[in-house]
């Protein structure tokens, strides 16, 4: 199968890469763009480890072809920090010990950011619902939910 030149925006930067037509966006981001924060957990869209936003919509990058990214805007976990300054979600995940092995963490961060961008003051139930597509086998979910709540509170203060 021949490769296609893909031109897209990733974390605010214009990116071009050659991509085989059958390659997932997950593999293209990792192997062609060098963004290894996008993780493969299941390859079937069930775990959320590969979560990104595509034109502002939360998606599992393992379910999207790389060629479909052409002309679109992608945000990954690598785009959350502002230089050396971590995003409040990243800070609160560390403070609340909401991570262990790290496979699921980038997906949770991206999903939580998508939630807080549309709902700055979510309830616990809304947080759990928004993160239901992300699976963690190490921490359980209480620390993750508490970290998202704390980040939401901090982000509201800064506005």
Image (tube, rainbow, N blue to C red):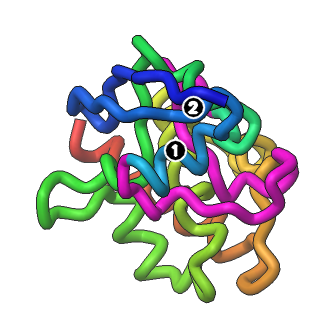
How far from the left and from the top, in percent, is residue 11?
Answer: 30, 37
Q: Quadrant of the N terminus?
A: top right
Q: Is residue 44 magenta?
A: yes
Highlighted magenta segment, given as a residue range = 33-58
> How many C-alpha atoms fall within 10 Å of the one at disc 1: few (<14), some, or many (≥20)?
many
How far from the left and from the top, in percent, is residue 49?
Answer: 67, 59
Residue at image x 46%, y 31%?
117
Visible residue check, residue 65: yes
Q: Most extreme residue toward the left, as rendered?
A: 83
How far from the left and from the top, in percent, is residue 98?
Answer: 58, 78
- Quarter location, residue 146: bottom right
Residue at image x 45%, y 63%?
36
- The foreground one among 134 and 153 is 134
Q: Tell me the residue that label 1 is attached to.
A: 28
How far from the left and from the top, in percent, is residue 122?
Answer: 61, 40
**Is residue 130 found left or right of 52 in the rendered image?**
right
- The foreground one among 100 and 5 is 5
**Is residue 111 found left or right of 19 in the rendered image?**
right
Q: Quadrant of the C terminus?
A: top left
Visible residue check, residue 121: no
Label 1 sits on a secondary structure element that is helix
> How many C-alpha atoms fall within 10 Å of the one at disc 2: few (<14), some, or many (≥20)?
many
Contact check, label 1 and label 2, Cβ < 8 Å: yes
Residue at image x 80%, y 48%?
133
Q: Return the mark for residue 66.
A: 2
Q: Give the dominant element type of the magenta stretch: helix, strand or loop.
A: loop
């Amino acid at each position: 199968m021949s490769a296609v030149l893909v031109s897209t925006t990733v974390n605010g930067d214009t990116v071009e890469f050659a991509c085989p037509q059958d390659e997932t966006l997950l593999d293209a981001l990792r192997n062609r763009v060098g963004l290894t924060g996008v993780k493969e957990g299941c390859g079937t869209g069930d775990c959320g480890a590969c979560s990104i936003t595509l034109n502002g919509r939360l998606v599992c990058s393992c379910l999207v072809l790389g060629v479909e990214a052409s002309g679109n805007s992608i945000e990954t976990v690598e785009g959350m920090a502002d230089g050396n300054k971590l995003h409040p979600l990243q800070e609160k995940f560390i403070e609340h010990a909401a991570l262990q092995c790290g496979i699921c963490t980038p997906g949770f961060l991206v999903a939580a950011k998508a939630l807080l961008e549309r709902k700055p003051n979510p309830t616990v139930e809304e947080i759990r619902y928004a993160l239901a597509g992300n699976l963690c086998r190490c921490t359980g979910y209480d620390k993750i939910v508490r970290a998202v709540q704390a980040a939401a509170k901090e982000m509201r203060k800064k506005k």
